[in-house]
Amino acid sequence: MPNAYLSPGVYVQEIPSAVQAIAGVGTSTAGFLAIVPDTVSIPERNPDYDPAAAMASAVAPSPVTKASSKAGDDGAKSSEEAKGSDGPTPPLKSVVGAAPDKTSRFLLRVFPIAAPAGEPRLFTNFAEFKQSYGDFSTDPEHNMLVHAVFGFFNNGGTRLYVTRMVSTVQLNSSLQALESVDEIAIVAAPGITDTAVRAALVAHCDATGNRFAIMDTPETVNTIDASLLPDGSKNAAVYFPWVQVFDPGVKTRYPDGPGLTFVPPSGHMAGIYARTDSSRGVHKAPANEVVLGALGLKYPIRKSQQDGLNNVGVNCIRSLNGNIRVWGARTIGGDRNGEWRYINVRRTALFLYKSIDEGTQWVVFEPNDLSLWAKITRNVTAFLTTVWRDGALFGATAAEAFYVKCDRETNPPELRELGQVVTEIGVAIVRPAEFVVFRLSQWTGPQGQ
């Protein structure tokens, strides 16, 4: 019954909207897995270092090449062989509980990892990460993680969950912990090239249905060919080779050297994915992008070498025009993956799946009738129209870019009896211009002039 109006005038009533807007989900939040011990050793400059005392110690007739000291009241010790490419390097001493030493160029500070094993912890910048996991260290696996996290934020990443494992025995439980974080869209295990870990990452992405894995090759390889490739997957990509970066820890230990080291590229690539998603959209291939922080490559890649890698899905990182650039945009398996051979096409599809799934939860338990079908069609069409206008779908008109069908044909009586409502959606996702061809010919002008 309408309201009883007692006097002439204008009255405003609120009515529920027929449109349930579908919002696009995030695509750039990453989740990293890493093997990290409970404590790591972080090198720091020794403020008491005396070059004269160090030189006298280095030339003294002593067979000692190692030094250790007590670390705290528990009697823990830390030591490392004195070595260096720029002359004798003095022995090292732990900062914790150690007496002042003028012969050591640097000290080792024992840092306890604050993050419990198996617990995903969110970080929004590198400073936050260091509070829980420490700085660049002498532990190889921990140091790879630190570089991956630094590369992620340095290349444009903004939200990152890190889950540490003491060993790969905790792999399944750690992946289950990551699965509980709904916003993660990218997963990686920086520097871990174990076959079982790779397979578990792919299975994790397949099971969740909305995640994409970034994988690394081993640092050192015997041949540069298709043997670098993990098992094929439409939900994963692999990058080669490792990149050379500046390492403050190496510079602290060997101050006379350049302070460089090689690190796996997956952390940097996750940041590039996030940067491209933010600036252009998930439909833009994360390729022909500069790898910020990369100073060199483990293996310089020639075009003739990439010719045999690109079609199988090994994405090369190359030095081009004075920059280190990502020069590949294929999923693992390349051409074998058919319509899913391009990273951006697959990630755009995952974005659409997740967005429509979350944006249509209101449909559950609604009366399955013509009115519901019309609402579903209207809402999905409005969302895809926005996606098309953003440039993610190919077509001069919306009708060329996508279609949405939810009617009697997709919902016959037998399906309605089962409590199902079925909507068929077709989209034309843009492909990257991977091969740019210019046709040139000599032209002398009209009438030979």
Image (tube, grey):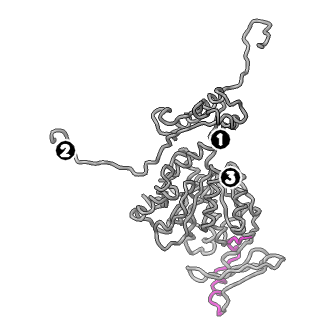
Q: Is tag 2's residue or tag 3's residue first in the polypeptide sequence?
A: 3
- The reply, left or right, for residue 96 in relation to residue 438 is right
> On screen, 424 above or below 195?
above
C-alpha gap between disc 1 and disc 2: 59 Å
Taking 373 as reference, is 130 above or below it?
Answer: below
Where, by quadrant of the figure, is residue 262 drawn?
Answer: bottom right
Element carrying mark 1: helix
For marks 3 and 1 on the same chain, the one whose residue lies earlier in the sequence:
3
Residue 335 at what x, y percent from top left? 46, 55
118 or 367, which is in the foreground? 367
- Disc 3: which residue: 124
- 256 or 175, which is in the foreground? 175
* Residue 173 locus on image (x, y percent): 73, 61
Q: Amino acid at mark 3?
A: Thr
Q: Which residue occupies 56% across, 52% down?
A: 273
* Tag 1 residue: 357
Q: Amino acid at mark 2?
A: Thr
Circle 3: is it few (<14), some (14-19), or many (20+) Cα within 10 Å? some
Judge depth for marks 1 and 2 and give the one in front: 1
Q: Which mark is residue 444?
A: 2
Name the outermost residue toward the bottom. 61
Which segment did they paint magenta? 39-61
Numbered circle sitting on residue 304: none
Asked if labels 1 and 3 touch by Cβ distance under 8 angstroms, the answer is no
Image point 55% across, 45% down: which residue?
A: 348
Q: Which residue does the image show at 66% across and 57% down from the upper left?
A: 126
Q: Position of residue 17 (x, y in %)?
A: 68, 26
